[in-house]
Image (tube, rainbow, N blue to C red):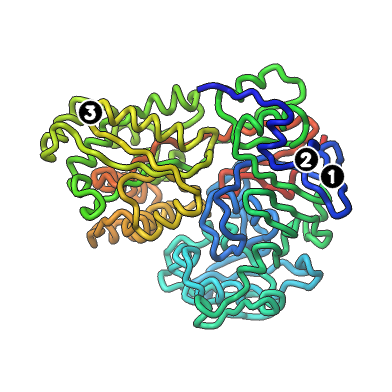
Amino acid sequence: MTVMSLSRRDLARLLGASAALLPMLPGGKALAQGRRDTLVIGIDISDTITFDPVRQAQYTPPLTLAACYDSLLTLEPNDLVNPKPSLATAWARTPDGNGWRFTLRQGVKFASGATMTAEDVKFTFDRLLNMKEQTQQYLKALDRVEIVDANTVDFVLNSPNAPVLSILCNPGCAIMEKAVLRQHGGTDAADAKDSDKATEWLNGNSAGTGPYRLTRWERNGQILLQRNPNHWRGAPAFERVVIRHLSDSAAQLLAVRRGDVHAAFNLIPEQIATLRGDANVRVDRLPSLDHVYMALTQNPAANPVLAKKEARHAIGYAIDYDGILGSLLGGTALRPAHFLPIGVNGSTEAIAREIGFRQDLNRARQLLQAAGVPDGFEMEIAYGQAAVAGISYQVLGQKLQADLGRVGIRVRLNPMDQVNLRTVYTTGRMQGGLLTFWNPPAVSNDLWASAVVERVARRVGWDVPQEMTDLTKRAAEEQDLAKAAELWVEWQRKAVDQANHFVLFQPIYQIAVRNTVKDFPLTAAGWQLDTGKVTLA
């Protein structure tokens, strides 16, 4: 892999900007990185579809949502197990033991200046439940929210032991201002899925209590955030935040070196290496809980060979996982066995080595013979025209194409727009393999596991047996952590054997940050950066 060298003119062309390489305010005033009131971030945001917290299910938007909204609870970077207070200051079981009672922080104001009340919390979750989007599935154990008084709400659960607290930390559970949402077409009615019209407004504005508010989003361009002077933690350090879409990692590298951005999120290992010794730029690292994977259909109408488990297992044994982690990623990644990232209960590197696929070309060829295709077969791998965790999907697709070719599996690569790719995947129209990511909306084993058996399985044509669904529920609700770990290991064995999803790597974030920035708190909790706590040196 080579590192591109771009001229200033080339970079300006890539950024779609003027020679200043920065967004312009009305009147032609540039937001220069050197100005101490503006934080500028370079990152690939091509996956962004919406900034409606309820409808968001992509990789990069949570960074923006977490800047504009607060949830009842939060997670801190050094502790992704125990939720901490945010808009709720205390929580305890309801008197009947079937739910959770939250005491709300008093005096919190929305960006509009209005004071948050229990009515806003109830509206937020009634809307979330009735919109019936993916976010609602994260909270499938939540039956309803009841107001106890102006500063207290009860979350009534249909499954008392279901994991809920950590899920409430995610930006999809952001508390939204009831009056503003209603003003712009939002509703919490039972038919909200069809009647709610607030999403369009939320794509260019926000209605939260976060340190910033959204003022503009230009798809594949930029996101502009403005300081919320009413934030309950105090006004953030910057007047505004500019999130620039830079799809090319070489453009990001040049921009952070020049000082045109404060931070670059998508640099490849070779580019990170060139920053060693640069007195102006440092590299901040943090193990993530994300993973990049290949989903593989077993729909015979798409590819009859892939309907055979032996053929899917052959693919699992043909992939050079060590080469991906070493040669492509420079060792800055881990690889779990399946959708439970290393570091959560029941998932360790030792377990991954024991039950995960590993490259074994002879075994792959034997499995192809057992599948009735000893000379191999043809298949497609689709991917987005974007980068993730320091590597482009194209390079990853080319690596898989070469690996599978060694056992006679002939791969056609199909690059697609990120939004189109998402549509193909979620509607189950993939024709073979598909490269994508999963970053947790919150840190909960149940979210990863339930995603597999409830949603992702449908996309790949897997009719999940009841015993797998029951195992997922049993593991999620087990209160003894040791027993739960055993159940999660069993769950991973079954998921690996099904061979519809091959986790390729779990990245370690490597973010290039200008030394003019003092605090740059990364988080693996699902939103990458706590933007409101970034400060200048």
Q: Which callout, 3 or 1, points at the residue further toward the start of the chain?
A: 1
Disc 2 packing (10 Å; few <14; some 14–19; many ≥20):
some
Is 198 located above or below residue 480 in the figure? below
Disc nearest the viewer among 1 and 2: 2
Residue 407 got which mark? 3
Disc 3 packing (10 Å; few <14; some 14–19; many ≥20):
many
Residue 30 got which mark? 1
Question: Which residue is depicted at the point 53% across and 41% down?
Answer: 386
Element type at mark 1: strand
Question: x, y percentage for residue 114?
Answer: 79, 73
Disc nearest the viewer among 3 and 2: 2
Q: Which callout, 3 or 2, points at the residue further toward the start of the chain?
A: 2
Element type at mark 3: loop
Q: Amino acid at mark 2?
A: Ser
- Residues at badges 3 and 2 in contact (C-beta under 8 Å)? no
Element type at mark 2: loop
The residue carrying mark 2 is: 18
Q: What is the spatial separation of the Cα atoms under label 3 and label 2, in whole angstroms?
A: 49 Å
Q: Between 97 and 497, which is closer to the camera in this rendering?
A: 497
Q: Quadrant of residue 535?
A: top right
- Residue 149 horizontal side relative to residue 488, left or right: right
Which residue is farthest top? 277
